[in-house]
Amino acid sequence: MDIAPQLALQSVLGNWRHSLATLASVALGFMAVASIHGYNVDSERLFNEIYVYRSMTGHVIVEAEQAGEDQIEIEGPTADRILSVTAEMKNEVKNVVRFLGISGIIAGPKSSFRYAGLGYDVTQGELTRGPNWAWNTPYGHPMKDSPFPQIVVGKGLAELLGCALTSREPKILPDGRYTDYGEPLACFDQTMQLTALTAKNKMNAWDAPIVGIVDAGFRDIDDRWVMMPLADAQVFANTKHVSSLGILLEDPDHAQAFIRDLKVKLGVQNPPLRITFWKDHESASVYRNMMGIMNLFEIFMLLIIAFVCVLSMINTMARNVTQRVHEIGTLRAIGYRHSFVVRMFAWEGFFLGLTGTIFGIVGIIIVSTLLDRAGILYSPAIFSQKVPLRIALTPGAYAWLGLFLASSAATTAALVTRIKIAKNISELLQPP
């Protein structure tokens, strides 16, 4: 039976005071990397909520293939066919929302401004947003099925149109969701006029009041964002076409298989359809770029932390070997091989790395819990709304990170020991 691990554990427990610096460096290094990874995981969750649920695009987006720079719309019969096929796949599909792009000029009480936005299925849109984002308006109220015209606009456009929001902070829950502001704004009593070119290049006008103000999600579109019910948008644009359909899946992990099945069931369409997983869609380029940078930064930090931990382990093990040279000589004299001593110190390094990892796990749990309870909201660079500052707990990643740090510590300890005790037994037993 190999007693090296047992002796190593006894040594770590008996000499823990001499290893405090190494334990601290491993624990703090673990917390640093785990914090960055947890923030990245929560950012991934945030992007998923914005794109899939808040924007109502679902996990799979169906569009007509683009012709040059012009986006072709999906004809009404084709859209109905997609709805029919997805209804047959009800075990895989949770909900489907149709969208129609709208753009033109919106006239307020004093000035006119360009707008761009969407008409969408109001009831289906609320189902896709789910209970967390059913209330998606920081001011006013979400659109409901109604025979009367209605629009919601982005915060930036609302201010341009005369809605006084500067001194009015929306009511935001600790997890970043909106709740009823409870106070109507004066601009809600005013009717706005929207103008746009129809599918046949005729100018149409549409009068509608603002019933709510939404956060468009990204600052570069918040100053021109408008949404209205799909039925109104189709009458306004004089068309039965739709721009896209967003499909919310029961299990997003099977999205690629679902896309393949949907293509087979739909067959060849004219114009051809483009069916895309949301992460691969051109609208998610911000997501891909941001997560790519953040993941690269995480790897960079991991390498730095590993380097610091290795330096600390080199210092600790070099000191331990020097202080215990007579003990090593005695072990060699009574018959233990050079490899046994190296293995014993490698186990010491492993146990030190593992202990530091455990301290780091406790620390990151405490930090994550405190952040959740604090309910800190901040405004990221590209988002127009405040989001909660959180660090996701990822046990699987902790196991891999802990194994990496403990293995690195063991390897470092073995190399240092092998170099330091490269002497014969008589030299090791000589008095200092």
Image (cartoon, rainbow, N blue to C red):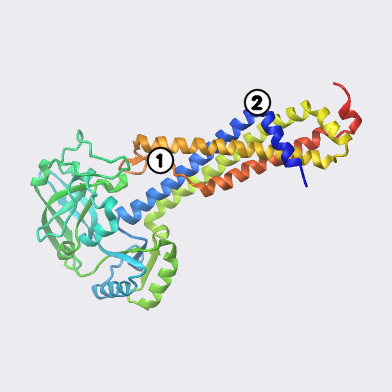
**Residue on which disc 1 sits:** 390
Q: Residues within 10 Å of mark 2 (few under 14, many from 20)?
A: few
Residue 385: where, in percent of width, then height? Answer: 30, 42
Q: Quadrant of residue 6?
A: top right
Query: Residue at 88% across / 39% down in the picture?
Result: 335
> What is the spatial separation of the Cα atoms under label 2 and label 1, in whole angstroms?
34 Å
Query: In x, y percent, where is residue 351?
Result: 66, 38
Q: Secondary structure at mark 1?
A: loop
Other residues around mark 1 within 10 Å, as few (<14) / some (14–19) / many (≥20): many
Viewer-proximal residue among 285 and 385: 385
- Label 2 secondary element: helix
On screen, residue 405 versus residue 334, left or right, reads: left
Identified by mark 2, the residue type is Arg
The mark that comes first in sequence, 2 or 1, is 2
**Label 1 amino acid?**
Arg
Residue 268 x %, y %: 37, 78
Q: Nearer the viewer, residue 64 or 176?
A: 176
The residue drawn where x is 49% and y is 41% is 36
Instruction: Return the mark for residue 17.
Output: 2
Can residue 347 be seen from the camera position used here? yes
- Relative to 50, residue 252 above or below: below
> Can you tell which quarter of the image residue 279 is in?
bottom left
Does residue 112 appear left or right of residue 357 in this picture? left
Q: Residue furthest front?
A: 1
